[in-house]
Structures are given as C-alpha cells and as structure tokens.
Image: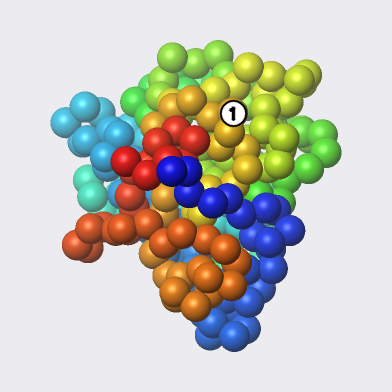
C-alpha cells in the first residue's frame, strides 16, 4: 500500500501549523529535516565509499536543510563543499552559513568544477514551494545534475520538478531522475514519477497532526530519523 501524499498547499499549511499549534520553531524543523538528510546520505554513501559531498543549496528553506545536513556530515567525517550562490540575508540562514565557515567547510561559485571532485551530491535547490521557470544561476546546475554520473540525493523534490505534476516536459530539468529522494514529513504527489531509492524523513509529527492531514506515520526504527520506502511511497 502506498503512503498517502501531501500536496504543496497542505505542505505549506502543515508547516505553518507546526510552527503555531505544534509549538515548533523554524530552526527546530530545519534542524530535524537537515539531520534526516544527513542520515540518508550516510545510508547511500557510507564514508568508506567516498567522503566528498557537494551540497547545492537554493535561497529558501530547501537550501537551509542542505546547510544543516552539511554540518552534520562534517561531524560524521565527510568533506562537504557548498554551492550556495544566492545566500539569504535572513538571520537564520546567516547563522547556518557561519556554522559551516567556522568548520572551514569550503564554499564554491563554480559548480561544474566542484562536481568533478564529488563522490555524492545533495540537491537542496528547490523544494515543495517551487513553481514557474528555473532562474539563473540554476539552469546550468540542474542540467549538470541531470547529466552527471555522480549519485544525487534530492531533498523533498528533484529540483525543477512540479510537486503535483512531476518532471518538466521541457527546460533544464527534463529527464532529470536522481538516484535517491528524501521526502520530508511525507511524500509529495511527484513520487508517482520517481524511480529511485526513496526515504521519508522528519520525525516530528504527532499522531493527531498526521490524522488531521491524512498522513501515514512511517515506522521509524530506534534512533533513526529516516525510513526507506518504495519508489512511489509504498511501505517496504
């Protein structure tokens, strides 16, 4: 049986409710999301298979999840490199960026050059709120993600995909099918078109909140912040 999905509209409403009735701060939610992303990387790319992780971050919350994930990965012994061309002036993102710089995590403006030295990539460019056209400087980055043989983990959505309608029919993301996807909180409708390894992350929903939004709480094991499900969200 497939896990029930969360539309873009309901995902935004759920985030808002988590930060009001749920009493979470955005810092907490981003920390838990980024932690789950880092655990998915550890599953997909154990350190002995290569420690060089290229993290592509967009300007919004998806990029923030990537910043948090990179910090955790550094502490696991990986060597993250950040591609973060549109750095937010928001105080939260500035703090996350400083935390990485304090660890001497390098930031690069040349994605294609960094890609040549990467063992794994985190696509944290666009999340569930993405719509419209891909704007500079990201078209060439998404084209590079589409064409690379380096494995890619997409955070919440493969960048440029529509949350409801899946992969674009044209543009830089046409044909982009990453090796793995981590859906945060719950799968989004786009998983219908996804063919790789699929994880659910974000272990913070109460049973009451899950019921209100018609979601299934996955069976997380022990201290795990992620659980692997079928490509289209089926329970394994």
Pick the quarter of the image with the N terminus: top left
32 on left or right of 135? left
Q: Residue at x 54, y 23 (%)?
A: 177
How many numbered markers are drawn?
A: 1
**136 or 172, which is in the foreground?**
172
Position of residue 187 measured from the top left corner of the image (x, y, whole percent): 53, 48
Mark 1 surroundings within 10 Å by alpha-carbon count, few (fewer than 14), some (14 through 19), many (20 or more): some
Residue at the spot 29% in from the left edge and 58% down from the top edge: 220
Q: Is residue 19 visible?
A: yes
Return the residue nearer the eye: 156 or 4.
4
Provide the residue designation for mark 1. Answer: 193
Q: Position of residue 194 (x, y in %)?
A: 53, 29
- Which residue is found at the position 45% from the left and 33% from the top? 231
The image quadrant that residue 199 belongs to is: top left
Query: Residue 68 falls in which quadrant of the image?
Result: bottom left
Where in the figure is residue 9, as x and y percent of width and height? 73, 58
Tell me residue 125's x, y (percent). Answer: 61, 42
Residue 232 vertical placement versus 220 (above, below): above
């Amino acid at each position: 049986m497939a896990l029930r999905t969360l539309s873009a509209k309901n995902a935004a409403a759920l985030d808002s409710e988590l930060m009001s009735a749920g009493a979470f701060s955005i810092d907490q939610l981003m920390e838990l999301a980024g932690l789950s992303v880092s655990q998915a990387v550890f599953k997909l790319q154990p350190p002995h298979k290569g420690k060089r992780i290229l993290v592509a971050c967009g300007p919004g919350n998806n990029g923030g999840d990537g910043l948090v994930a990179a910090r955790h990965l550094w502490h696991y012994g990986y060597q993250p490199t950040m591609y973060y061309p549109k750095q937010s002036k928001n105080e939260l993102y500035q703090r996350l960026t400083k935390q990485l710089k304090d660890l001497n995590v390098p930031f690069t403006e040349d994605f294609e050059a960094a890609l040549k030295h990467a063992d794994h990539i985190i696509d944290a460019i666009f999340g569930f709120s993405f719509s419209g056209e891909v704007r500079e400087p990201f078209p060439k980055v998404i084209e590079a993600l589409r064409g690379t043989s380096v494995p890619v983990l997409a955070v919440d959505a493969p960048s440029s995909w529509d949350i409801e309608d899946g992969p674009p029919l044209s543009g830089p993301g046409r044909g982009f099918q990453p090796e793995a996807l981590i859906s945060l909180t719950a799968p989004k409708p786009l998983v219908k078109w996804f063919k790789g390894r699929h994880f659910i992350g974000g272990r913070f929903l109460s049973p009451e909140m899950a019921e209100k939004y018609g979601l299934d709480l996955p069976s997380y094991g022990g201290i795990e912040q992620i659980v692997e499900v079928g490509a289209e969200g089926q329970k394994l």
